[in-house]
Amino acid sequence: MNNPESITSLPERPDDERRRRVIHYSIAMGIRIICVLLCVFVRGWWLVLPILGAVVLPYVAVVLANASTRRPGSVAAPGQYALNSASLSSRSTGADEAAR
């Protein structure tokens, strides 16, 4: 029973992942609102900074919110290996029967 996978290699719960993504996105959009408000009060060449923040931040927020935290080689679902081994065994028996 030498299973390289452990319970710690399972992915984050979908509810926890969704909550984390919503929090990151909300923080980025809050910063964007501050940048838009600063555009009203800031004058001169400093105005470029809040404008740049207001324009670039939505793209960055979406990319960060959709970024996957899944580690390579991690289990996508707890039953993934059971399903894969069952489908492999059915394929091999099907191929054996076709060869006969």
Image (tube, rainbow, N blue to C red):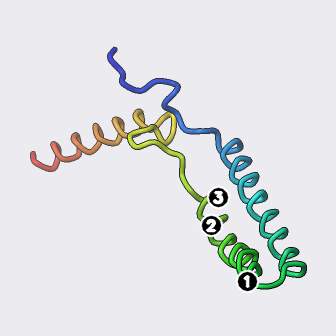
Q: Residues within 10 Å of mark 1 (few under 14, many from 20)?
A: few
Residue placed under numbered mark 2 in the picture: 60
Give the number of the disc on residue 97. none
Kind of residue indicated by mark 3: Ala
Give the number of the disc on residue 45. 1
What residue is at 71 percent from the left and 72 percent from the top?
53
**Mark 2 vs mark 3, CA separation in Å:** 8 Å
The reply to whether dot 2 and dot 3 touch (C-beta < 8 Å) is: no
* Viewer-side label of 2, 3: 2
**Mark 1 vs mark 2, CA separation in Å:** 23 Å
Earlier sequence position, callout 2 versus callout 3: 2
Q: Secondary structure at mark 3?
A: helix
Location of residue 14 (image quadrant): top right
Left-right relation of 13 to 46: left
Location of residue 60 (image quadrant): bottom right
* Viewer-side label of 1, 3: 1
Kind of residue indicated by mark 2: Val
Earlier sequence position, callout 1 versus callout 2: 1
**Mark 1 vs mark 3, CA separation in Å:** 31 Å
